[in-house]
Image (spheres, grey):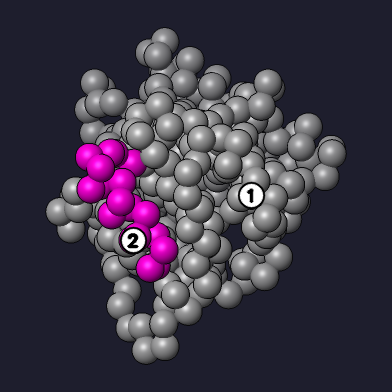
Amino acid sequence: MHALHHTTMRWRAAGQTFAFLPTMGALHAGHLKLARQGAEMADHVLASIFVNPKQFGPSEDFSRYPRDEAGDIALLQTSGVDLVFAPAPEDIYPEGFATTIHIQGPAKAGLEDRFRPNFFDGVATVVAKLLIAADADYALFGEKDYQQLQVVKQLAHDLGLRTAIVGITTQREPDGFAMSSRNRYLSKIERHQATAIFKNLNQAAVKIRGGAKAQSATRAASRSLTTLGFKVDYVVARNAETLAIPKHQDEPLRLLAAAWLGKTRLIDNIEV
Ligand code: PAF
């Protein structure tokens, strides 16, 4: 943390702004897009690499989560990042660490929280610690993890942090499949099938824009994914800001989906 503060204090003393990009490494083109957007927004970009044990459930992929710190640092340096903060677990959670940040509202929307019960406590705790340590002008989060983005916005607002939370649109492969670190778990055949999530979300959005009821459009998308061999956790339409179940026709909507393909859990979301 000492080296981090030394550099960020120097930037601030020189009147320069900086954007912060928190990551768990295993970087892909989506992260690099975030880094480049940070470089356009601010004078400097700081990125962190930390695979946060607190946001993985006991049966999740913490131990096999892909790690390549040297490769990730090289990628970040070619994408406009000036400083990489890669703390050890004891830097973030020193002996005796006893705080957990527990958020309601968007963190209790019945989406990821329903299937990953401790996920947002773990995310909120580490993100709060990182945001406070970085004290950046902007922090960048991908819209791919849409519920996480709303949770982080709530956290920054509630804690009165000075950092502006900026959501960046999802980076997609040419067939529309959303980029993610976990995509590397997919076999070639699964990767080919996986594009159906985006396609079905898109079809549902088109139907809703054309006047169809959100619930019937998302149900049809869910049925179609099940027929294609996915094990669907949810395909739903929610209020785009609060993630609450929509009550009025003219609310801004977001369609969100999570489904298993073989042993890999995929999530995606789109604007209506
Ligand atoms: O989205 C991620 O990569 C992680 O959840 C984050 C925000 C870096 C916190 O560990």
Q: Earlier in the sequence, mark 2 or mark 1?
A: 2
Q: Residue at x 60, y 28 (%)?
A: 172
- Nearer the viewer's eye, disc 2 or disc 1? 2
Q: Residue at x 50, y 53 (%)?
A: 84
Q: Nearer the viewer, residue 99 or 256?
A: 99
Please provide percent x and percent y for residue 74.
65, 46
Looking at the rendering, the stretch of residues picked out in magenta corresponds to: 1-18
Query: Residue 5: which disc?
Result: 2
Please provide percent x and percent y for residue 106.
30, 50
Q: Label 1 belongs to which residue?
A: 72
Quadrant in which the C terminus is drawn: top left
Q: Tell me the quarter of the picture where residue 31 sits.
A: top right
Residue 197 showing in the rendered view: no
Residue 39 against residue 27 in the figure, above or below:
above
**Count of numbered circles on the image:** 2
Please provide percent x and percent y for residue 42.
34, 33
